């Protein structure tokens, strides 16, 4: 049986809160992307050789992002991602107010790669993340970050 408001496609599936078949005003769109698609896209953008390398880049980037964000925001973000990759975001945010340079340094240290690779990997994960979650959720993330993070997460409303 097909649920009302769900469009099954091979790419992303968009789910709206509906009443009598119509989207309800004031509800936020949710976008669901498949695990394999997320990993493949990161692998391609980061120029990685294996899915395992892409999953590692995703894991450490999300773990570092959770350390940077405050409150329940990491969990809100994780709710819009496949469970297989959302785990590093689960839990209370670390509220560590570190710079973008420190963000990249931490990613590189955790992943065991040099800074240029860490930057490329984090940017790939961020690009795929932005396409995978709602604009409103990305705006909530950007609200907690210093202006320099625009390099990684873009401008509000993107």
Image (spheres, rainbow, N blue to C red):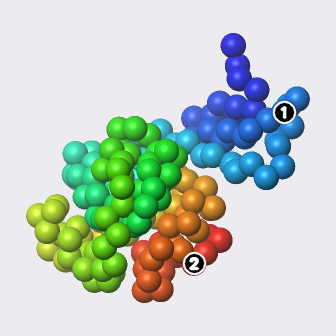
Horizontal and vertical percent position of residue 79: 49, 45
The relative height of residue 16 versus residue 67 in the rendered view (above or below) is above
Residue 134 visible in the displayed image: yes
Please indicate whether residue 151 sits to the left or right of residue 29 in the image. left
Residue 27, x across and y down, in percent: 74, 48
SS assignment at label 1: strand
At which x and y percent is residue 57?
26, 57
The mark that comes first in sequence, 2 or 1, is 1
Quarter of the image that includes the N terminus: top right
Between residues 19 and 12, which one lies in front from this camera angle? Answer: 19
Give the residue at mark 2.
155
Residue behind mark 1:
19
Residue nearest the viewer, comparing 32 with 8: 32
On the image, the x and y values in percent for residue 16 come to 72, 40
Residue at x 48%, y 80% (from the top left corner): 150
Is residue 22 rendered to the left or right of residue 134?
right
Residue closest to the eye, 78 or 120: 78
Dot 2 falls on a residue whose secondary structure is loop
What residue is at 16 percent from the left and 61 percent from the top? 111
The disc placed on residue 141 is: none
Q: Gap between marks 2 and 1, in whole Å?
A: 33 Å
Of badges 2 and 1, nearer the viewer stands 1
Q: Is residue 36 above or below residue 74?
A: above
Residue 47 in sight from this viewpoint: no
- Residue 157 position (above or below residue 49): below
Q: Is residue 4 rendered to the left or right of residue 81?
A: right
The reply to whether discs 2 and 1 touch (Cβ–Cβ < 8 Å) is no
């Amino acid at each position: 049986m097909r649920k009302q408001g769900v469009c099954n496609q091979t790419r992303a599936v968009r789910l709206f809160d509906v009443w009598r078949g119509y989207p309800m005003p004031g509800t936020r769109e949710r976008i669901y992307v498949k695990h394999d698609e997320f990993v493949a896209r990161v692998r391609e953008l980061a120029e990685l050789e294996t899915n395992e390398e892409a999953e590692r880049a995703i894991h450490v980037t999300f773990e570092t992002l959770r350390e940077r964000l405050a409150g329940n925001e990491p969990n809100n973000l994780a709710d819009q991602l496949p469970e297989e990759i959302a785990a590093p975001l689960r839990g209370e945010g670390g509220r560590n107010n570190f710079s973008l340079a420190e963000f990249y340094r931490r990613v590189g240290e955790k992943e065991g790669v040099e800074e240029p690779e860490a930057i490329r990997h984090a940017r790939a994960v961020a690009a795929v993340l932005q396409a995978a979650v709602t604009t409103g959720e990305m705006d909530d993330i950007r609200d907690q970050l210093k202006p320099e993070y625009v390099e990684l997460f873009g401008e509000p409303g993107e």
